[in-house]
Image (cartoon, rainbow, N blue to C red):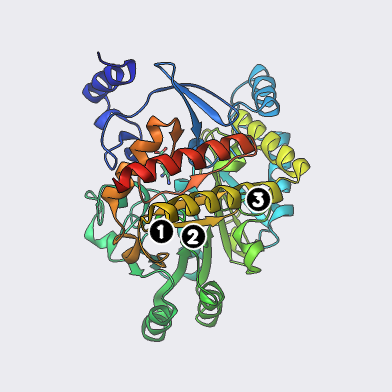
Amino acid sequence: MLTRSKKLFQKAQKIIPGGVNSPVRAFKAVGGNPLFIRRGKGSRIEDVDGNTYVDYVCSWGPLILGHAHPAVVKAIQHAAKNGSSFGAPTEMELEMAQLIISAFPSIDMVRLVNSGTEACMSAIRMARAFTNRSKIVKFSGCYHGHADGLLVAAGSGAATLTIPASSGIPESCLGETIVLPFNDLQACTKLFSERGEEIAAVIVEPIPGNMGVVYPQDGFLKGLRRITRNYGSLLIFDEVISGFRVAWGGAQTLFNIAPDITCLGKIIGGGLPIGAYGGRREIMEQVAPLGGMYQAGTLSGNPVAVAAGIATLKTLKGSHGYGRLDRMGKLLCEGIRSAADRSTIPVRVEQCGSLFTIFFCETPPSCYEEVKNCDFEAFKRFFNGMLKEGVYLPPSPFETAFISLAHTKNDITMTIEAAGRVFAKMRN
Ligand code: HOZ
């Protein structure tokens, strides 16, 4: 008998491309049928067939407090009652801007937009306006949303579907983007020595999450900071995933590096659509109406999204939750590692606080090229085994998984035990 998820997916495929509104959700990398989700509460989600799962997708990062946190629900209800959108400034936007600026010392001014894609797209335009240069450097496996020019060797869904560069983007546009391997400072030094004066900005996920969690090697980010400064280029940290996730002030606080521009999203919207880009005052003064770099949006600074974001950030700050998230992350990842060791299946679990990725390989990948050499068949079997056990992981080997403050020790224990059983089955 067809499950309700299957029936809905069949219908959806007729009227929505691939049956989904964002490609990774189609389960192409893991086979089978995507689950249609009915509701979520805390660390759990329930599908339309009534199955419940411990959720490690958490809406791909925004839900650091878990699903339907009471403070966030209350803030959304209250804001919606007062009107869902005005297209005019509100006092709450000021509060959000202040929260962001106080958390990120590198940000003097910030502009709210509607998604991480918009944040990165605007950051690039602003960097070009400020430097009066056109070339952009990005790293393979990093994903900065789906704007033209950033969709080359991109992680996330593009990596999952092995799309090297999206069709529909003019050659002239792609020619402005130079792609380097992540963690290869030498390649970056060489490039700048040859073409440094043409480069407007280097954009990087300081802790990539869109090829799975890959650690920046010692000196890599500091090196990027030094090189960009020497050549008058800007350094853009895409902290859409890592911002407010790995620390209150994001990865830049962890590594003590001040980028020129920071892109944010996800957590600052508490599960509603939002993005933001911010940076040094003289750079942000390029943005209209102060300067000539244009960027706008009917729903920018949307009061309901901003209310959800403020409630999330305030609850997060009040909870002193980063220690707990890190402890839970360590507990879970050490448990999964031991379970894998017992099965003798080569597995590397990379973790940074509440972010983690299970790579099926011998050594932790240091760049996209190494991630691509992992065993994706093994990942697929593991994913599907875990799903049967009631654990919902990201349905792609190129994504990071997320732990929330709603995850309990019981969830972690249950997940480790499930992983043990799945690894044992995979070995047989
Ligand atoms: N690009 C998102 C993860 N890095 C996936 C978005 C989605 O499918 O919801």
Residue 319 percent across, percent down from the top left: 75, 41
Mark 2 vs mark 3: in front: 3
Q: Which residue is mark 1?
A: 142
Q: Earlier in the sequence, mark 2 or mark 3?
A: 2
Q: Which residue is mark 2?
A: 205
Nearer to me, 36 or 391: 391
Horizontal side of residue 135 vs 249, given as left or right: left
Q: Quadrant of the N terminus?
A: top left
- Asked if 14 appears above or below 287 in the picture, the reply is above
Query: Total of numbered circles in the picture?
Result: 3
Mark 1 is surrounded, within 10 Å at the Cα level, by few (under 14), some (14 to 19) or many (20 or more) other residues, namely many
- Give the residue type at disc 1: Cys
As helix, strand or loop, the secondary structure at mark 2 comes to: loop
Q: Are marks 1 and 2 in contact (CB under 8 Å)?
A: yes
- Give the residue type at disc 2: Glu
Instruction: Name which residue lies at 37% across and 49% down.
Output: 156
- Give the residue type at disc 3: Arg
Q: Earlier in the sequence, mark 3 or mark 1?
A: 1
Q: Are marks 3 and 1 in contact (CB under 8 Å)?
A: no
Mark 3 vs mark 1: in front: 3
Q: CA distance from mark 2 to mark 3?
A: 23 Å
As helix, strand or loop, the secondary structure at mark 1 comes to: loop
Image quadrant of ligand 1 equals: top left
Residue 102 percent across, percent down from the top left: 74, 53
Q: CA distance from mark 1 to mark 2?
A: 6 Å
